[in-house]
Amino acid sequence: MSVFQHSRVIPANPEAVFAAFEDPMRLARWWGPAGFTNTFETFEFQPGGTWRFTMHGPDGTDYPNQAEFMEILPPSRVRLQHVNLPRFELSLSLEPSGDGTLVTWVGVFENQEFSENMRTFLEGANEQNLDRLVEEVRATPVSKFICPLCGQLNDCLGAQEGGDPSKCWCNAINFNPTALARVPPEYRNKICICRQCATEPARP
């Protein structure tokens, strides 16, 4: 077996980075090396779920792929098994790092001879994949109606046209300071988090 490990700090919280993976439309935009596009046939984002898709190379070559999701822990971990050749296990972990997220990408290939012969290409492709993930996260605007932590509606009356901020739900609760600290700096005092995130138990 051969192991490939890459890491990148992305200037967004883990929830925002994870959202770029769990949404198939967004995942299709950034998955694969530079110049590749994707067509998803099946995307069952749950443990045991199937992910069947075709990658289209810049030269027009099609590459059928099939994987099985083995572990999904929002917003911190995704682990999958690529079941057609070349077979490999891929793990992506997301950890808070300052004002961003440290993404660690680990691929373990079954066929050592194949992966070592392709190491230069695979390492470059993985870095390009992370480049595309960074661009996807940066390019996705955050709406004033969307919680910047979980991506759900925040029901903020102050953000609604004609809404009365003094009657908003946020005036009747005590915000968890841990949740507030997780809001990216560029959204603080600009976009509300949702009630669930505001009252969630403190993380260890």
Image (cartoon, rainbow, N blue to C red):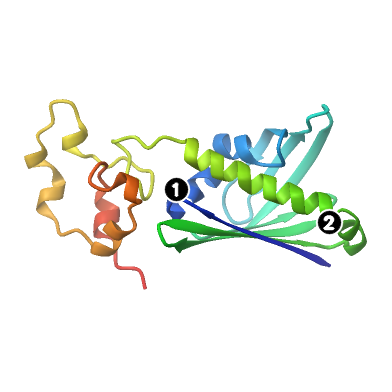
Point out the tag, 2 or 1, that comes first from the N-terminus: 1
User: Can you see residue 74?
Assistant: no
Q: Is the Cβ of the residue at disc 2 closer than 8 Å to that at disc 1?
A: no
Res 147 quadrant in image: top left
Tell me if 8 is positioned left or right of 144 in this view.
right
Give the label, 2 or 1, closer to the camera: 2
Residue 190: give x, y in percent of width and height.
25, 41
Where, quadrant-wise, is the C terminus in this rendering? bottom left
Residue 72: give x, y in percent of width and height.
55, 58
Question: Residue at horizontal 83%, vertical 56%?
Answer: 119
Residue 82: give x, y in percent of width and height.
75, 53
Res 111 quadrant in image: bottom right
Q: Secondary structure at mark 1?
A: helix
Q: Amino acid at mark 1?
A: Ala
Specify the farthest residue to the left. 166
Where, quadrant-wise, is the N terminus in this rendering? bottom right
Q: Alpha carbon of mark 2 to alpha carbon of mark 1: how far?
A: 30 Å
Q: Nearer the viewer, residue 100 or 65?
A: 100
Q: Secondary structure at mark 2?
A: helix
Circle 1 packing at 10 Å, graded few (<14), some (14-19), many (20+), is many
Tell me if 155 is positioned left or right of 51 in this view.
left
Residue located beneath label 1 in the image: 16
Tell me if 174 is positioned left or right of 105 in this view.
left
Q: Amino acid at mark 2?
A: Arg
Question: Residue at horizontal 49%, vertical 35%?
Answer: 139
Question: Residue at horizontal 45%, vertical 56%?
Answer: 100
Residue 166: give x, y in percent of width and height.
7, 41
For residue 119, the mark is 2
